[in-house]
Image: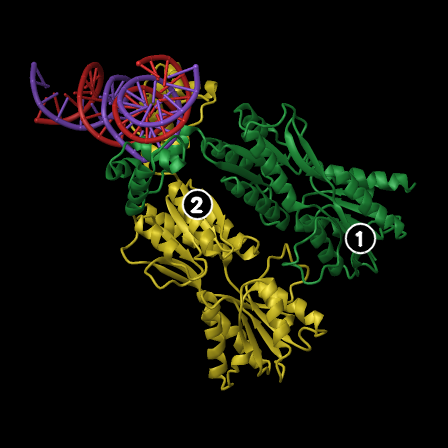
Chain colours: A green, B yellow, C red, D purple
Amino acid sequence: MPTIYDVAERAGVAPVTVSRVLNNSGYASEATRQRVETAVAELGYTPNRLAQGLRSKQTQTLGLVVTDITNPFWTTVARGVEDAAHLEGFSVVLCNTDESESKQSQYVDLLLQKQVDGFVLVPAGNDLKALLRIQKRGVPVVVVDRRVPVPADSVRCDSETGAYHLTQHLLERGHRRIAALSGSRTVSTATDRVTGYRRALEDAGVPVDERLIFHRSFTQQAGYEMTTAVVEVSPRPTALFAVNNFIAIGAIRALRAAGLRVPEDMALVAFDDLPLTLIIEPFLTVASQPAYEMGQRATELLLSRLAGGGEENPVEIVLPTVLTVRSSSG
Amino acid sequence: MPTIYDVAERAGVAPVTVSRVLNNSGYASEATRQRVETAVAELGYTPNRLAQGLRSKQTQTLGLVVTDITNPFWTTVARGVEDAAHLEGFSVVLCNTDESESKQSQYVDLLLQKQVDGFVLVPAGNDLKALLRIQKRGVPVVVVDRRVPVPADSVRCDSETGAYHLTQHLLERGHRRIAALSGSRTVSTATDRVTGYRRALEDAGVPVDERLIFHRSFTQQAGYEMTTAVVEVSPRPTALFAVNNFIAIGAIRALRAAGLRVPEDMALVAFDDLPLTLIIEPFLTVASQPAYEMGQRATELLLSRLAGGGEENPVEIVLPTVLTVRSSSG
DNA sequence: TTAGGATATGGAATCGATTTCATCATAAAC
DNA sequence: GTTTATGATGAAATCGATTCCATATCCTAA
């Protein structure tokens, strides 16, 4: 593999000149520029990014840590990150924690060792250690999707309001007994959405039945289990609020298994849409988050920090959700 | 950020000794070992992987290049790669080409510059240049999912036989006019599956109607378009064979739009299952590929090459598909 | 005419690890 | 009682780039 020295020798210049030509930094006459470029082409030279990064202390690489790469929501966020990063010449290393704190810890350490220039992080569970370690190292980080109790740049959606609207929508359709199927209590999106749900009920003067509020995890499996439990509650609720797409899918399957129709026997609303590429016929009433934009905005914020711009104080970007009414809510 | 020199100083030893302790290479007395470890802990030292990689010429990193990360099939392959790599202490950098040759070229170059130790590659389109560039650099690479006309380690499924079985299944149900909805002619999986389809028809003595064979791309959109076209063919076919999951989804949507029921008005079989986390009620008859295992096997093969093992000749691993009969085929 | 700036280029140090080679005990072998 | 492994450690070179500092033109403004 040819190095910058080989190119230099062939072009009859010093390595530093090759560097200057390739990076378009400093001066170089048209003649040397030419000679260097032909030498590069003839040798098939490619710079070694490890050496570059070691010396320049910049890797042009961002770390992206998400909690569930099998969920299209996160895939879409990742594309937003990827595209925004690409525009500025950055590449992205994607890591998946499966909501596990130990995996998160491992990956963050690895990315730190790889000297990524910044992080887009979805904090797993309620573990702040990884986030704090990044911040302590002085590496810029933008938190996505979730609130954290420490100062940090962040991009998320207004979960509470989105949940409020979904619940309100069900109330308007006459539902009074609405169950909430949520994720782990340690995740802010799970609790915020339940808070919005509660507030909507209270504002409507409908008493909150704690037996109808479930906390499990953001998975299809959990959705199935919670729904299996919910249909046993007496009197049975007439509507379900699933706080994410996977929980909703699990809920539908459980309802089918129980012989209940949506929405005739049980209305259903959910957070997070599913992409049209995966869905045959959209019928879920949802509060959808602008996943792509979330990734994009987070990355832009991160890159602006890397460019040294921005104020001192953490920036919090809160995007609105969009309510899409379909047949599942009756 | 503390370096190995800082640790060495604090522990009262030479940097090389710290390296030896940390990598468990060479000798080190229990006493120094102890001192180094406490120094590491006190300083919160983490090795710089760029420096390590630069010097040792090994990054413990694999490049994974896939064609469509929004397709759960590839997500699953990626998990297989990730897990297998992780077991051996390797990390994975995932890149998505969207079947674009220029993106593939860019990413492969980038990964080469980042000095990845090896590649798991799904060649985009019919562009071999990227693959050849990797091989020319002497970097081990395993091709996944597709056949290529150059010697290379590879892992894929027996597309032709899978397609044969699916078509045969439709024939057994009495269908005689079966359309094939395929991807790009430049991709071996697209053509192999059509070959299997043809062979099944011929073996059954059913004439092949070229108007019923479509080549577009592996997307939901293409599936929709091809199906819209297919229902106009006269006499209309009674069954469809979609060569991947996304085409199948597009087909179902197009059939609904045309007011046709599955399977009553049109039977449907497809390649590639969709994960249960995304599907409410599985009803597609499919030939499914062991996606996770494909990623895993490819990675194991790659890692064995990295370890210097294996014979000289390229290894080709061809896995069988599994036929799962559900309601969509009648 | 000369000081000073823009242009053009190179030498040497540096980034933070590992590798190679060398040194020196200490214990085992003849 | 010398020779020879084995254990333990370090000095210096090295990986392949960039950064910093120095040098030398050439041109222009004072």
Q: Residue, x 37% and y 50% (percent of image)?
A: B302
> In the structure shown, which secondary structural element does the residue marked by tag 1 occupy?
loop
- Using the image, name the chain to which the residue with label 2 belongs: B
Q: Is residue B200 above or below residue A45?
A: below
Residue A168 — which label? none
Residue B42, can we see it? Answer: yes
Q: Which residue is mark 1?
A: A231
Q: Is residue B130 above or below residue A132?
A: below
The C terminus of chain B lies in which quarter of the figure? bottom right
Q: Amino acid at mark 2?
A: Ala
Q: Amino acid at mark 1?
A: Val
Q: Is residue B121 above or below residue A298?
A: below
Q: Which residue is mark 2?
A: B85
Q: Identify which residue, B147 or B133, lies in the foreground.
A: B133
Residue A211: name its quadrant: top right
Q: Residue, x 64% and y 56% (percent of image)?
A: B278
